Image: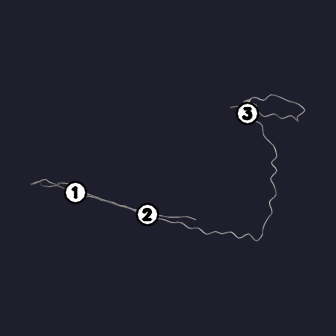
Amino acid sequence: MQATLAIKDLSATEELDARAMRAVRGGTVFLPVLPVFSAVKVDSTFNASQLVGQTQNVVNMNGNNAAFVDGIRSHVDSTQNGTNNIYR
């Protein structure tokens, strides 16, 4: 779909290619003036519901079901950290 723009109130007309259209700058935006209220009450209540659930299962079966085995070593280092922060 191709859109076209027609400006009819110019004294000179010129066909612009895509590169020339990208270089077009300027214009004015008129925004309506909104009334200012000096007694506006702002509610800054902030409610946050937080839930952190963690589960960790560590199983080490080194040498399991091995009879008459010597020198089996096993070392397990298990760490779990959790944080829950809300920054306002």
Q: What whole-number distance in Å separates the C-alpha atoms at marks 1 and 3?
A: 72 Å
Residue placed most toward the observer, 71 or 2? 2
- Determine the residue positioned at 71% across, 31% down: 2
Q: What amino acid does circle 2 point to?
A: Val
Q: Is residue 14 left or right of residue 53?
A: right
The tally of labels here is: 3
Q: Residue furthest right?
A: 11
Q: CA distance from mark 1 to mark 2?
A: 32 Å
The secondary element bearing badge 1 is classed as loop
In the rendered structure, which disc, 3 or 2, sits on the residue that comes first in sequence?
Answer: 3
Q: Which mark is residue 37?
A: none
How busy is the neighbourhood of tag 2: few (under 14 within 10 Å), some, or many (20 plus)? few
Disc 3 designates what residue?
3
The disc at residue 74 is: 1
Give the vertical position of 25 relative to 64 (above or below). Answer: above
Which amino acid does the dot numbered 3 rest on? Ala
Nearest the viewer among 6 and 70 is 6
- Residue 46 image point, x, y percent: 59, 67
Q: Residue at x 88, y 30 (%)?
A: 12
Counting from the top left corner in percent of width and height, residue 23 is at 75, 36
Comparing labels 1 and 2, the label whose residue is closer to the camera: 2
**Image height of 78 relative to 43, above or below:** above
Measure the alpha-carbon separation of dots 3 and 2: 52 Å
Which quarter of the rendered picture does the N terminus lie within? top right
